[in-house]
Amino acid sequence: MEETELLKERLQAITNKRKIQEDIASKRLEIDNEKLKLQQLKDRKEIEALEREELNISTNEGLILHRLKAIEKSTADIIKAANENFKSEPIQVYSGIPDAQKSYTPLNMRKQTSVDQRLNHEQQKPALLAMEINVQKDLRTGKSHVLSTCTVPAQELQQRGIKVYDDGRKSVYALHSALDQPEPNGVDELSPKEVEELLKQATEKRKKPQDHHEPPHLKNYQHSPCSELYNMEMNEWPEYKHSGIHYPTRKFRNLLATSPNTVTST
């Protein structure tokens, strides 16, 4: 009897233990199921939150793009809007000015006209001083030397002379004797440097006293209209060549310097 009761108790304990284990297993399964449900719910909420956030972002993007399109206007739209907002006002011009000139001349034309008038006025002025200068040119050195100077009437020399220099203040004419008249195109024009050098020599020549020890053939001046002119013997001076034309030795280049503005020609 005792063994039977012990066996029953043992079987009962084993059965209870098995039930407890089954209960624990079922509870674990329920817990795992609850965990899965919670995880799914959590994931679903996260997905919904992400979807809502994405929807908000899309909405904001649309608003931003709409604002950008509203701000970014084309040039034609800006001009059109400006023209629509612009109100043109009539411009009143008062033409009844009593002191206005009827005709207008440009400034450069007025300057040119004044210059031409001044030049014409200067050309019409008579020469204040005419001086005849006898010059000898050395063919070896090419330099010109003033032999004599004298004051003569300007009109007479201008009629029979050939102009070789003119700067508006001084005019230079080449004069020749009646026995040997060269062609007009056979006289070279003088440069300003040559004219200034000749005038300088002529001025110095007039200031220097006459040399009393000159050779006899240089003192023969009684047949000249000017007391300072020199008559040369043909065999005592070398031949003078000017502008391709040969002149005898006593033919010198005569220069007339006239100055319409100043008394002196230097």
Image: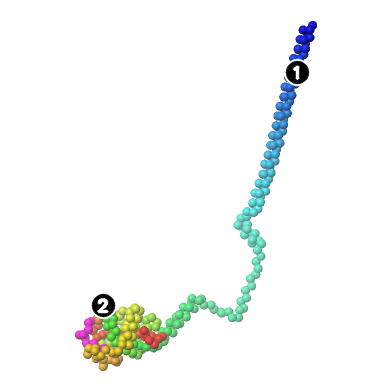
* Location of residue 125 in the rendering, given as x and y in whole percent from the top left corner: 41, 87
Image depth: mark 1 or mark 2 in front: 1
> Could you say which quadrant of the image residue 206 lies in?
bottom left
> Could you say which quadrant of the image residue 229 lies in?
bottom left
* Location of residue 72 in the rendering, given as x and y in whole percent from the top left corner: 63, 53
Q: Secondary structure at mark 2?
A: loop
Mark nearer the N terminus (1 vs 2): 1
Q: Disc 1 and disc 2: Cα gap in Å?
A: 154 Å
Residue type (three-letter) at the residue carrying disc 2:
Thr
Residue 5 visible from this viewpoint: yes
Residue carrying label 2:
141
Residue type (three-letter) at the residue carrying disc 1:
Lys
Residue carrying label 1:
19
Q: Give the side of residue 262 with respect to residue 65, left or right.
A: left
Residue displayed at 71% across by 27% down: 32
Q: Secondary structure at mark 1?
A: helix
